[in-house]
Image: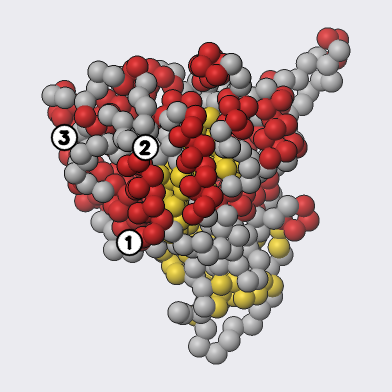
Amino acid sequence: MNNLLIRNANSILTGLSGDAARHIGPDIRVTDGRIAAIGSLTPLSGERTLDATDCVIYPAWVNTHHHLFQALLKGDPLGINATLTPWLAATPYRFRAAFDAKLFRLAARIGLIELVLSGCATVADHNYLYYPGQDFDSSAILFEEAEKLGLRFVLCRGGATLTRQLESTLPQAMRAETFDGYLADIERLAARYHDPAPDAMRRIVVAPTTPAYSMRPHELRECAAVARRLGLRLHSHLSETVGYQDSVQSMHNMSPVRFCESVDWVGEDVWFAHMVKLDADEIALLGQTRTGIAHCPQSNGRLGSGIAPIRALEDAGVPISLGVDGAASNEAADMISEVHAAWLMQRAKGGEAARPVYQNGKGEAGADAATVEDVVRWGTAGGAAVLGLSAVGTLVPGQAADIAIYDLSRNPRYFGLHDPAIGPVASGGAAHLRALLIGGREVVRDGAVPGLDMQALAAEARDAVCTMLARAENI
């Protein structure tokens, strides 16, 4: 493996907290795929150099919740103004049967390319495109496409043994799996792909699509037991809307988090996406058990679900990470858009709760609810923590060299910054990605994926959308 010296960075954010959140640098040495040193460094004989003048360096992003197949479902007019439940029927369920192996592969490729061009190195995809009689292996396709790009890939194997009423009139592609079949596939995937190493390129997670609707309580308990026997983590959706709260209360006479506790779905090896709607008791329980969250602010905003109480969760001890969710409910499914939204929305949530002094409030608030350093930590080290990938997510000697280098000199959006380090998060947009390293390997170079014909990919996507619309009309 080629060794590399990254030189003269303007700023380095490490993914750590407090005073350690920034490093003066200005250089980073990469040796055999790992960070060897950070500081003022002299080039070694034969060492390749990368000039990072005017660049800001972050740990590569860790995306802890996605639905990659939705990359071909952006901006569907029937779902664009819908809340979660009607949106599910209007968009992902309506088009589910339109996917074949070719379209699924194209969607995965588009989603992964969008992520790497934002500086993302690790992707946890919550794939739930599984059904009896399916004639392609969606799991294998995801791993193949991630490997082509050099990404770390975590397959959260979704699926369901139950269906909701809104799915009952939909076709074969919506039919439930058997529980034995689901567990057998988990065993197959774990044996074939799962690597427990702290810098693994491939992981498997047990991830029924949503606890309240996808499996019976005894099946959820058995899933948890199987996962822990195999050394796998657990993931699902939870408490995204008030409708979810109402449903679980009606079905089980308890809150969603208490229900998960009752089926052994809390703990340091569990993280849930969304968790927008939580009461104080649930927040305390999540913190006590160190159950994590994949915060998805853009999707939650787009669907009108609300803003997750991230500051309260972190203060309670909940591990925080960030996910882009599927592109069908987030038309900008990249990590820069997501971290920008996370930074703004937590501040907006703090301000929304503020009350004037004359009403016994404390006046203006919220502007310090999330710092840029907080958001970088959530999107890097936080993601690595909930995935159990302890060797990634921070810029520290000894860690895997997953490094995003943003050049702020090419876009006036970033001109005039008094503190360039905050630019990619605070200014949003699309900072030019000078390079993305994953395990020291250059995956993005000068804003492009080497060998990728972007115009050809765009043409494929346009044709695919037409094909899917035609198929959906005939299902």
Of badges 2 and 3, nearer the viewer stands 2
- Sequence-wise first label, 2 or 3: 2
Whether the residues at callouts 1 and 3 have beta carbons within 8 Å, the answer is no
Q: Quick check: 229 left or right of 451?
A: right
Marks 2/3 in contact by CB < 8 Å: the verdict is no
Q: Which residue is mark 3?
A: 467
| Of callouts 1 and 3, the N-terminal one | 1
On the image, the x and y values in percent for residue 212 come to: 48, 26
Q: Is residue 203 left or right of residue 68?
A: right
Give residue 148's mark: 1
Residue drawn at 60 percent across, 67 percent down:
399
Distance from the alpha carbon under mark 1 to that under mark 2 = 32 Å
**Helix, strand or loop at disc 2?**
helix
The residue at 27%/36% (across/down) is 131
Query: In the rendered image, which quarter contains the C terminus?
Result: top left
Task: Tell me which colouring the rendered structure shows.
Answer: secondary structure
Q: Position of residue 13 (x, y in %)?
A: 65, 57
Task: Report the amino acid beneath label 1.
Answer: Lys
